[in-house]
Image: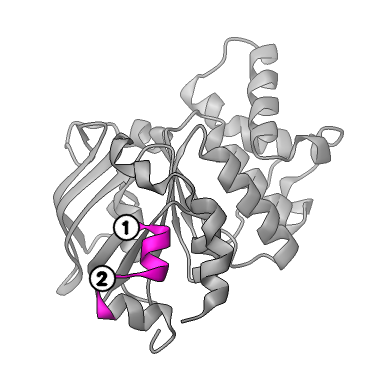
Amino acid sequence: MDTTIIETQMPSMLGAAQDAGIPVKIEARGVNVHYGAKHALKSVDIDIRANQVTAFIGPSGCGKSTFLRCLNRMNDTIESCRVAGSLRIDGDDIYDPTLDVVQLRARVGMVFQKPNPFPKSIYDNVAYGPRIHGLFNSKADLDAVVEKALRGAALWDEVKDRLGESGTGLSGGQQQRLCIARAIAVGPEVILMDEPCSALDPIATAHVETLIDELRANFTIVIVTHSMQQAARVSQRTAFFHLGTLVEEDDTATIFTNPRDERTQGYITGRYG
């Protein structure tokens, strides 16, 4: 086994033994996803705990991003996609047909693989969501929301004197932190991150990973990553997916040092992937 993985993750695992006492934020039971005739996700059961980082790992095409997109109904945009089973956030049925999907996506924000700032100013990128949802009463209120979100994304000090400049003019790492600021500006409870560092250089990746660790004090975070080292560094829980099946989920230290399933062991030690 690659001992580098084990060594880099251990500081994140302090207190893992107390996981059982942490409230469940999202509960999934028997979740199946089909894309047309393809059975992409098979009977997934998992509890995602509040104010922790849960990492989804596994080979390409294993279902981890498909499941992530179930959590804020992004799969609704795919005509051939059918989702069955139970998914609840704080007991509320995510797939209740009477649920306002716009409000759901305010509760469950998303940061994508490639930074995707709007072709607007830095200020307007962050203000977009609060404007849509009417989360302010005055320009001063909106200014405060924008500043709070940019501070929360560890970006304020770098951009406070150029809020009127285009968000697309920032560096890749700054753009991704701007997208995180845009996500948190509407006050979500959960942040989904689909390989948020895959397009970033190592220094920008380190900034985002530090930010993720800080954000979990206020948000529940679910991250899909192909990097086992990243999962080990940032997460408290790790779930391993393989061929559309959730093979196992446990505290990150256990997954990387003492997995229950041979498939997990094989993936972590590089025998396949």
Q: Amino acid at mark 2?
A: Arg
Q: Residue at x 30, y 35 (%)?
A: 21
Query: Camera-side residue: 107 or 165?
Result: 107
Displayed quadrant of residue 209: bottom right
Find disc 1 in the rendering and name its residue: 250
Q: Residue at x 63, y 31 (%)?
A: 149
Query: Camera-side residue: 89 or 134?
Result: 89
Task: Determine contact: label 2, label 1, CB under 8 Å.
Answer: yes
Assign a secondary structure to mark 2: loop
* Residue at far bottom of view: 271
Q: What is the spatial separation of the Cα atoms under label 2 and label 1, in whole angstroms?
A: 10 Å
- Is 26 located above or below residue 11 in the figure? above
Indicate left or right for 179 with 64 as reference: right
Residue 59 visible within the image = yes
Find disc 2 in the rendering and name its residue: 260
Indicate left or right for 39 with 77 as reference: left
Magenta-drawn segment: 250-262
